[in-house]
Image: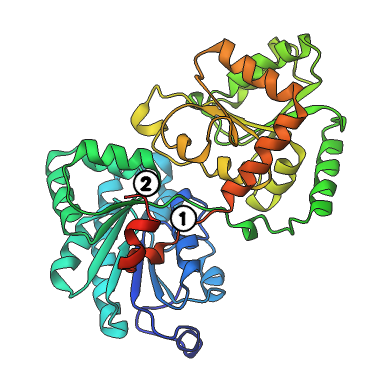
Amino acid sequence: MEHISQLGTQIREKTADPDILVISRIFQPQEAVIGEYVYNRCLQDPDRVIVLAAGCYGDTIFDQAQQFPIYRWPNLKFLGKLICGNFLGHIFKPIWNCFNIICSLLLAVKLYFRYHYRYIEWSHGYDFPSILLLSYILPVRFFIYLHGNDLADVSRHPLWRSLFKITLQRAEGIVCHSSYIRENLRKTFRLDTPTHVINPVVRPEKFGTPSSLSHLDDLRTRLRQNYNIPETAIVILSVGRLVKHKNFDRVIDNIPLLLTIGVDVHYIICGQGPSEQQLKSQSQRLRVNQRVHFAGYVPERELAGYYAACDIFAMLTSEKDKAKNTNSFEMVYLEAEYFGKPIIASRLGSILDAVHHEENGLLVNPDSGYEVLQAFKRLSQDAQLREKLGRQGQELAKRKTYHRWLYNPESRYSCLLN
């Protein structure tokens, strides 16, 4: 962790003229969608950005390897969980939030006198009072990102909601990570602030392996051998926390049905969570426990093998807790697309930005057993369709919208959804 009072010669050599301060309580190497999103943004303009973030495990080594300067404040929530556990961590949540607000405010001011940056990119709706105060204290303009749950959390409290609206009105622009978040924002607030959609992108380097065709074929063969899966079998893959609303059980329900119609099918689940034992019991009850494989937690660097080994990627998230479940942009859809895999997904929320029906996957109503079965049956039995949707998905996954366009008036409205 670099002290705010120090600026190494190496950093000065790397950074020519940084003019954008990116502030985020969540940043790499912490594995989180927001942290990955913000890191990818910084990689677009390493010569222009300075990062101010909360500390996390392993940040010292990570920060030293970057092409842009990174400053950290202590992460009390992280330390509190280590010392007190999750229960007391929730009790002290307001204290952590206030600490984040104060640290980001004071350190942003200090960094201004060092760099004289002209813009701030506030990377989430959390701790927004800090950016509101900074907009009055410093002669800078700012953009604010919204990811979904941060918007839902702020909107629950009348006072916080009013202050947040003022913050959004003072922003130079609002960046939503999906069209669904933008629509929710418009329903929640009446604003004249320019609002843009910039979807997350896949960073191949995080998988830690080259993605040549021969290497992926080798990964596919080795992983299937580890699970005793024939090369000719259809493999369905899901990646995520094992919680009820992600409906892994509905995929398991379809395994015996697919076997009945002659599809040699296996299902691999990567992840851990409270539903794990229930899912294992279900697979045993349906007598498909030899075909449903629980991989447990899989580090990002090893996920490439699982994506390579599968033929279909499936996630049937439900909207029973709409505010929570449909806001979050699941990177796993984009990752599956990057590896050329067709997707079966729920027709709702932010998923619609990642999965386009009949273009890179099939969208279904997760509550319709018939729709779900027909989608699995269609993709399992049609290799040409799988290849076509996977190829088109790869093309979509490689498309990028750059944050630097926010600063280019000529391209701001032509290159970003507005």
Identify which residue, 148 or 172, lies in the foreground: 172
Residue 403, picture quadrant: bottom left
Q: Earlier in the sequence, mark 2 or mark 1?
A: 1
Q: Amino acid at mark 1?
A: Tyr
* Residue 282 visible to an observer of this rendering: no
User: Which x, y percent locates residue 208?
Assistant: 69, 59
Residue 37 numbered tag: 1
Residue 49, picture quadrant: bottom left
Please name the residue shown 61% across and 46% down the image: 335
Identify which residue, 255 or 126, lies in the foreground: 255
Residue 11 numbered tag: none
* Residue 145 vertical placement versus 220 (above, below): below
Please name the residue shown 57% across and 36% down the image: 240
Q: Amino acid at mark 2?
A: His
Residue annotated with mark 2: 147
Question: Are the two marked residues, 2 and 1, in contact with CB atoms closer than 8 angstroms?
Answer: yes
* Residue 42 visible to an observer of this rendering: yes
User: Which x, y percent locates residue 364?
Assistant: 53, 22
User: Which x, y percent locates residue 126?
Assistant: 29, 51
Residue 268, picture quadrant: top right
* Residue 11 vertical placement versus 332 (above, below): below
